Image (cartoon, rainbow, N blue to C red):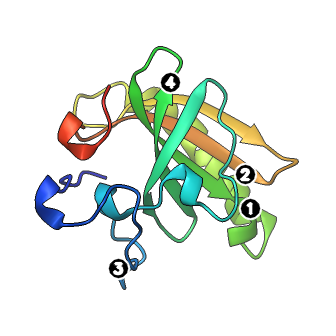
Amino acid sequence: MARNLPDDSSGLKPGVAAAPPSDPLTPLPLRTTPRLQDCISPPARVPDHELICQIGHGAYGEVWLARNEVGTLRAVKVVYRRTFSEAYPFEREFNGIQKYEPISRSHDGLIDILQIGRNDEAGYFYYVMELADRVSDADGISE
């Protein structure tokens, strides 16, 4: 999911949420996505990662910008069971990402899946990926 990060000329203040785009699969610009403190419900818990802000969403879940324990920025996709009417598609997605994980590191053109986890009690699974776009200090987030 490559996308260009907005420049600082948007006129929006960091942490100020704008209306989401009409297409739910369109990644939200980093400057206009809600910060963690602006979220109504707490995001998923991902071990050894701090979720910073939501950078995208789709039919099955959310993509978050995250920082790992050593300060490296990553992307984390969280897929919720509640977005499926039945358990089978949720399980199919989880099994699919498990099969894709080793393949993801076999070609330079693929985004590496670095970690997969699951929280059945809270009803989600997640996977940690390398960040596809470079993030700079101008984006309000430093590595």
**Dot 4 and dot 1 residues touching (CB under 8 Å):** no
* Relative to 96, residue 46 above or below: above
**Dot 4 and dot 2 residues touching (CB under 8 Å):** no
**Dot 1 and dot 2 residues touching (CB under 8 Å):** yes
Tell whether 5 sits left or right of 19.
left
Residue found farthest to the right: 121
The tag earlier along the polypeptide, 4 or 3, is 3
| Mark 1 and mark 2: Cα distance apart in space | 6 Å
Point out residue 122 in the picture as x, y percentages from the top left corner. Answer: 82, 51
| Mark 2 and mark 3: Cα distance apart in space | 25 Å
User: Which residue is denoted by mark 4 in the rendering?
Assistant: 68
* Relative to 63, residue 116 above or below: above
Amino acid on which the number 3 mark rests in the picture: Pro
* Relative to 29, residue 2 above or below: above
The tag earlier along the polypeptide, 1 or 2, is 1
Q: Nearer the viewer, mark 3 or mark 1?
A: 3
Amino acid on which the number 2 mark rests in the picture: Tyr
